[in-house]
Amino acid sequence: MSKSLNCIICGVGGQGNVLASRLIAQVLLSRNEHVKTAETIGMAQRGGSVASHVRGGRPQSPLVPKGHADTLIAFEPGEAVRCIDYLAPGGTIIVNTQASQPPTAALHDIEYDGSEALNYLRKLPDANVIEVDGSRICEEAGSAKALNIVLLAAAVKNEALGISREELEEAIRERVKPAYHEMNLRAVELVFSEDV
């Protein structure tokens, strides 16, 4: 049995963070470990904020309390900042460096490239920040839809989830449609072959 796991996966609708949480849960279930997941979803299905909570061990609630997340996996820099209150001291942030324009910025013609959010994260005194060029790796893997797998693989590679590459790959085979196996496994391979 692994120690308890408290992980937040945050992004916007349509990026695949709910599937990412299901893959982590699949690994824990395959070990016969207790796991709870939950999502908090914003107003829009696509473009609205989505935060998935994954808790291993014997938590009372499926939602990670603020200040208790060991790992924060952010599909976009602004969402990492929005969820930073959940991170425990000394926690790890896996963040995609490519920004996603939020609907509010688009509606108000505000430029947003995520650079201010990344600078904020870099200055955090008690966090391990791992930046991932998810767009580039996804392009090499063959699809932008592999971003969730790229970020999960980066978390696994940096030992932020307590699961192995082999366990992640097996969860992909079990939970992802067979038509997407090759692309997603290629994404894992690319992350593990790079300095991420």
Image (spheres, rainbow, N blue to C red):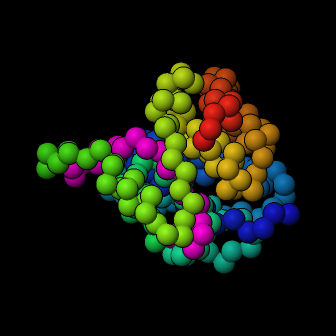
State the quadrant of the C terminus.
Answer: top right
Image vertical order of residue 42 relative to residue 85, above or below: above
Residue 148 place in picture, x, y as percent: 55, 41
Residue 53 lies in what quarter of the image?
A: bottom right
112 sits left or right of 179 in the view:
left
Range of the magenta residues? 86-105
167 and 26: which is toward the camera? 167
Image vertical order of residue 48 relative to residue 7, above or below: above
Q: Residue furthest left?
A: 108
Residue sitting at 54 percent across and 65 percent down? 127
Residue 189 is at least partly visible in this image: yes
Residue 88 is at least partly visible in this image: no
Residue 110 place in picture, x, y as percent: 17, 48
Residue sitting at 61 percent across and 52 percent down? 21
30 sits left or right of 109 in the view:
right
State the quadrant of the N terminus.
Answer: bottom right
Residue 96 place in picture, x, y as percent: 47, 45
Inspect the magenta stretch and tell me whether residue 91 lies in it. yes
Image vertical order of residue 22 relative to residue 169, above or below: below
Residue sitting at 42 percent across and 48 percent down? 76
Residue 175 place in picture, x, y as percent: 69, 39
58 sits left or right of 67 in the view:
right
182 sits left or right of 17 in the view:
right
Number of marks in picture:
0
Image vertical order of residue 88 relative to residue 192, above or below: below
Residue sitting at 62 percent across and 38 percent down? 195
